[in-house]
Amino acid sequence: MNDNLKLNETELLDEYYTGEELSELETEVLVGKVEDKITQNKSRVMSFLRHIKALSNYLFDKDVKWYRKSVVAAALIYFITPIDTIPDFSPFVGFLDDLGVIAAVVKYLGNELKRYYD
């Protein structure tokens, strides 16, 4: 892998993951970036758009513990980051790893996530 790509991934992780609970502003920025990515790639993510939206709603719920939100935040950050296991610029295949991460988090949260679907 290109050293510049590794550096960019590290910089992105350092920017988003500080080991502390996200502030309300950071949460809004994260959800905004997720919504931007969905808009730009709507045809590719239609099958799990509802899950992304439910995870976003879950992230904004003030009654959810921060450590539960951290799992969702990590998955959403992985989803919006263009350089990951399979880069998103690879047609279709680039979103398979994103789909897998989102599916794993949805399965992990299970029934707890049901009430966050619109």
Image (cartoon, rainbow, N blue to C red):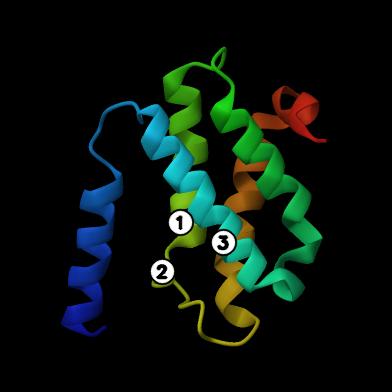
| Secondary-structure class at tag 1 | helix
Specify which label sits upstream in the sequence, 2 or 3.
Answer: 3
Q: Dot 3 corresponds to which residue?
A: 36
CB contact under 8 Å: marks 1 and 2: yes
Mark 1 or mark 3: which comes first in sequence? 3
Looking at the rendered structure, the kind of residue marked 3 is: Asp
Residue occupying the point 28% across, 43% down:
17
Q: Position of residue 1 (x, y in %)?
A: 26, 83
Q: Is residue 103 left or right of residue 59?
A: right
Discs 1/3, front: 3
Q: Residues within 10 Å of mark 1 (few under 14, many from 20)?
A: some
If you read the primary sequence from the N terminus, does the residue marked by circle 1 or circle 2 appear first?
1
Which residue type carries mark 2?
Asp
Tell me the residue that label 1 is attached to.
Answer: 78
| Quarter occupied by residue 97 | bottom right
What distance separates the C-alpha of mark 2 from that of mark 3? 18 Å
